[in-house]
Amino acid sequence: MMASSDDSTIPSHTKAWFYSEHGNPGDVLKIHPNWPIPELKEDQVLIKVVAASLNPVDNKRITDFYKDIYTPDPHLPIVPGLDVAGIVVKLGDQVKKFKVGDEVYGDINEDGIQNLKILGTLSEYTIAEERLLAHKPPNLSFVEAASFPAAVETAYEGLERADFSAGKSILVLGGAGGVGTQVIQLAKHVCGASRIAATSSTGKLEFLRKLGVDFPIDYTKENFEELSEKFDLVYDTVGQTERALKGVKEGGKVVTIVPPGVPPAIFFVLTSKGSILDKLRPFFESGKVKPVLDPLTPVPFSQVIDALSYIQTAKATGKVVVYPI
Ligand code: NDP
């Protein structure tokens, strides 16, 4: 027996964006009015999606950008989308952490972009294992909560892998992006960085300063690796690893999240964990670590293709969130 609010109100099918072949989102992404919702496994919950944020990897999957490195889509057709905030409407038999009616958020794909869910989050309903989810802090709206999971968990995992700690300095490449904005805030408020530098284009330097950056660097005017100042950690969210290696102090580290990563830089792909969101909850509740929403947010469900095209420009500031769904 599975617990639910009222089984008669839970649909067996959902409206969802899907693709049956790879290509540009505008050509291949379509709305499915009746995508079948699979049976819940014992550790999964069914979520009524309220908001879903977009990630560059959504485009990379759809266009098959990684075809020479990964085969990310287990089979087609498939519903994309990793990040969700919504309401639990049904529980698998062994679910312990949540009950029906709980407001949750998370990145529903545990293993980066491998073993992708057939039913992603660009859908009115989605499914996730309870270990990938956390309770939504009440002070965050669904839109704000949906903006966090993949970006902040990636930011956290990179800082953890680099053993970043109080009193160290950091340079964030791509400081204005979804991940970069969270690396800056975690470095400052969670880790206690001594000094934070970050790169952006000219128009975003003031934004970086307001986010907590001590030393914003305009990449259109300066090459960060030619500066005399060096850093304990360079966190590369752009794909500039070889240059990043020239920006570290002796004994310093480089973390990169853009494949392939050049050793000795630490390259990793995010493992989604609700426990990271739980750990960071006090910082979200106190407002020390804030959601950063691109001005395009909120994007109505019908406008997902335009929003994905915008993300493809790599000009988003913080996160683009789809709402209402
Ligand atoms: P975004 O689309 O949010 O990044 C957009 C930002 O990048 C813009 O604000 C832009 O600022 C900035 N930017 C673009 N070019 C440069 C540049 N040359 N120097 C400095 N800043 C630049 O991306 P995300 O932050 O979500 O992701 C970043 C990358 O990391 C993507 O390639 C993504 O696929 C990857 N990723 C990998 C993960 C992993 O697990 N390995 C997890 C998450 C993301 P401006 O307008 O000022 O140029």
Image (cartoon, grey):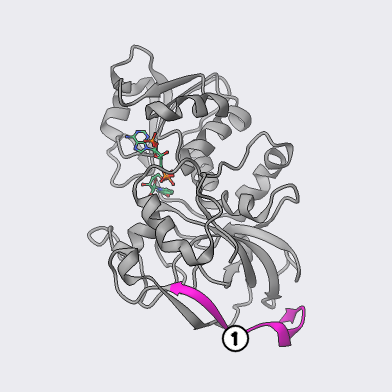
How many other residues sit within 10 Å of disc 1, few (<14), some (14-19) or many (≥20)?
few
Q: Would you say 47 lies left or right of 153 here? A: right
Q: Quadrant of residue 23?
A: bottom left
State the residue in front, 194 or 87.
Answer: 87
Amino acid under disc 1: Ser
Q: Is residue 17 left or right of residue 224?
A: right
- Residue at the spot 50% in from the left edge and 32% down from the top edge: 163
Which residue matches tag 1? 12
Residue 6 lies in magenta, yes or no?
yes
> Residue 122: horizontal and vertical position, in percent?
50, 67
Q: Is residue 1 visible?
A: no
| Quadrant location, the N terminus | bottom right
x, y percentage for residue 233?
A: 43, 27
Magenta span covers which residues? Answer: 2-17
Looking at the rendered structure, the secondary structure element under dot 1 is loop
**Quadrant assignment for the C terminus:** bottom right
Instruction: Please indicate, yes or no, whether residue 64 appears anywhere in the rendered image.
Output: yes
Magenta stretch holds residue 39? no
Furthest residue in direction top, as rendered: 228
Residue visible at 32% across and 71% down in the picture: 28
- Residue 276 is situated, as x and y percent measured from the top left of the image, at 61, 48
Question: Ligand 1 shows up in which quadrant of the image?
Answer: top left
Q: Is residue 154 above or below residue 9?
A: above
Question: Residue 176, how many percent across, how many down?
Answer: 46, 35
The one nearer the camera, 130 or 18, is 18
